[in-house]
Image (tube, rainbow, N blue to C red):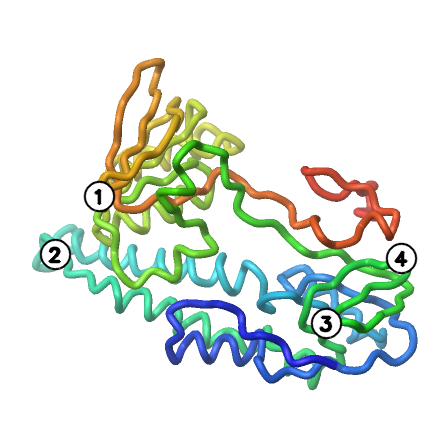
Amino acid sequence: ITVNALPEITPLDEHNRRLIANVHPPDWVNPRPEGRYNLVVVGAGTAGLVAAAGAAGMGAKVALVERHLMGGDCLNVGCVPSKTLIRAGRGAAHVRAAARFGIARTEDAAVDFAAVMERVRRVRADISPHDSARRFRDEYGVDVFLGCGRFTGADTVEVEGASLGFERALIATGARATVPPIPGLAEAGFLTNDTVFNLTGQPARLVVLGGGPIGCELGQAFTRLGTRVTIIEMGECLLQREDADAVEILRTAFERDGVDVRVGTVLDRVEVRGDTKVLHLTSSGAPATLEADAILVAVGRTPNVDGLGLEAAGVRFSSKGIEVDEHLRT
């Protein structure tokens, strides 16, 4: 039995307090394990929550382990906050384009960035009861353990000193933002999807590293809200895994909105001059510099496999993730 520490989330306003009270209650007391579980789920993000609720609904005895925030990326630092931010950007764009619909045009829609971000936090908190620890305990009968889970054998997981025996286990620990080893980047400071929604002040100039889905959606949203955005992509086009027709539609939209896209560009190093971050680039073989107030790193994802004790469970894994068969089994 343990009382879990409060996760560090900023700003700690009424909305984030409400979020934490649902998805990682600071006064939460882990249950005492009783007997062997049919299923232990490690990770309470989208996959883990669905699996736990589904198995419990079919009568299984289920334990759910989460070290940070229930709801995972989707609720806390992914789908919910990003789509809320995108909606605000779309609203600003509609106001600016009002003349197209016969409505008196407003050249510059006034954006209250602090209010936009407060709405992001409020919407997230409003949705959080659906992914809450209490809901999964009280409605589904799931034993919810808050803390770091680690395999100690082929059929046991330890969390906060308690040993959970299981017949089956689901590893649903997700991934985190990959941070490239670029000289000066760590010293200059940067944002990822984990931290960008903590902003309360609007950066005037934002450089986005990576032209994938996260970089593109957030880059466009910030542009529409009034930030000067430059997206840097090493490859020769944005969204390299998508169809060329879709990429062209996106390029046209970015051109319309004023997103500065630089493909075939490599960030060599970053230096700090006063309050300004200076990015030294190589673009099409030529050196260039770019100044920014903030840098958003969105170059890919790294699987969360470290510290899980996978070796003790006999599970093979690498930096690319866990090895599975055609049925996603280890």
322 left or right of 304 in image = right
* Residue 36 falls in image quadrant: bottom right
Which residue is painted at 16% across and 50% down in the image?
100
Give the labeled residue for mark 2.
102
Question: Tag 4: residue type?
Answer: Gly
Measured from the top left, where is residue 20 in percent x and y?
51, 76
Q: Earlier in the sequence, mark 4 or mark 3?
A: 3
Q: Earlier in the sequence, mark 2 or mark 3?
A: 3
> Which of the marked residues, 1 or 2, is nearer the chain's N terminus?
2
Foreground tag (1 vs 3) = 1
Circle 1 sits in a helix, a strand or a loop, which is it? Answer: loop
Residue at the spot of label 4: 153
> Mark 2: which amino acid?
Gly
Element marked by disc 4: strand
Residue type at tag 3: Ala
Q: Quadrant of residue 216?
A: top left
For disc 1, the marked residue is 274
Which labelled disc corresponds to residue 53? 3
Relative to 260, is 197 on the left or the right?
A: right
Left of 288 or right of it: where is 14? right
Q: Earlier in the sequence, mark 1 or mark 3?
A: 3
State how far apart marks 2 and 3 are (Cα): 50 Å
The vertical placement of 21 against 221, above or below, is below
Query: From the image, which quarter does the N terminus lie in?
Result: bottom right
Vertical relation: 46 (above or below) 286: below
